[in-house]
Amino acid sequence: IAKFAGYGFNKSHAAAYALIAYWTAWLKANYPIQFMAASMTLDLGNTDKLAIFKQDMDKNSWDLRTPDINKSYAEFAVEEKSVRYALAALKGVGEQAVRNIVQERLSNGTYKNMEDFIARLDPKNMNRRQFEQMVCAGVFDSLNENRAQLSGSSELLLRHAQSLEEERQSGQVSLFGGGDDEGAGGLGLPDLPAIKPWDQLERLAKEFSAVGFYLSAHPLDGKLEQFEKLGVLTIVELEERMQNEAAIRTQLAGVLLKKQEKVSQKGSKYAFLQLSDPSGVYEVMIFSETLAASRDLLIPGEML
């Protein structure tokens, strides 16, 4: 060990690490919003790391704004005293697709409504899966707040975009189109089916699937007052108490994110659970008896 120490972390190595640590600490202390935007862009494709950054921003009361078709970029961006979520960080969307959409917005102005967006969309840049993920993340909320309607109409909308593109390519105008108010291709947006908006829990569940963590709100936000009366701690409150108390027996609440079952050397099953509460994400371990008794409840998305 002593011999390795002379090589493994020698003076020049330690000095380089110290310098980088000083630089990053100074940047975070003096330019926190820019630092967080840059750090999150560096881990654009790592949802677990992005969730940790989100927790850090929450602790410091820094605002992370939801993705928006007229305000977001492919990467995380500084907006006033907040960070605007990156379109390319959404699951299954793809960086090139959103770069083309953003470039169209920068070249020809913001998207006025869904009709305008579909008229200007190159269908080669977007498939149904990508569109639905953007809908679930709330990217189009400023154009149409009914995410359920847009999600249910995704095939219809993309087919309409394809028709407009074919018209542009052929140089023809629709038999019934041609009005100046009917979008770039002369075809107005087709009537969307009347679909009831998702309730808050379903809306958040779908947002979670697109983002990878709860961004705009948390399913347990409305229960915090009840938890306080029942003595249920958030993970941040527990961490604060653990600074001063050696042993704590308490209750926590959370939405189950992931479950991983394992088998011990003695053959008994146990599990690691990843949960999320309004203050952060944490992991708990349960042993065979609890696992057997509660297996039916251990479904991702369930509130425990």
Image (cartoon, helix red, strand yellow):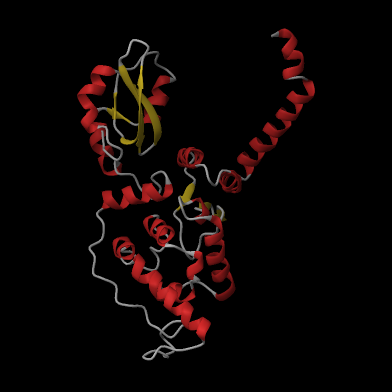
Residue 298 higher or lower than 206, as above or below: above
Vertical arrangement, residue 39 with respect to residue 99, above or below? above
Q: In the displayed structure, does residue 174 sit left or right of residue 31?
A: left
**Residue 79 on image: x %, y %:** 54, 57
Q: Is residue 284 visible?
A: yes
Q: Quadrant of the N terminus?
A: top right
The total number of labels drawn is 0
Quarter of the image containing the C terminus? top left
Instruction: Describe residue 172's horizontal placement relative to residue 266 as left or right.
Output: right
Residue 272 locus on image (x, y percent): 36, 25
Q: Is residue 277 above or below residue 189?
A: above
Which residue is more in the foreground, 102 or 187? Answer: 187
Q: Residue at x 44, y 74 (%)?
A: 162
Q: Nearer the viewer, residue 184 or 139?
A: 184
| Image quarter of residue 16 | top right
List x then y, in percent, for residue 39.
59, 43
Q: Residue at x 21, y 31 (%)?
A: 296
Q: Quadrant of residue 14?
A: top right
Q: Compare residues 164 and 194 and report the one nearer the observer.
A: 164
Residue 226 appears left or right of 93:
left
Image coordinates for residue 136, horizontal then vertical, percent: 37, 56
Q: Residue at x 46, y 52 (%)?
A: 92
Q: Residue at x 45, y 76 (%)?
A: 119
Residue 112 visible in the picture: no
- Front in this rendered view, residue 156 or 250: 156
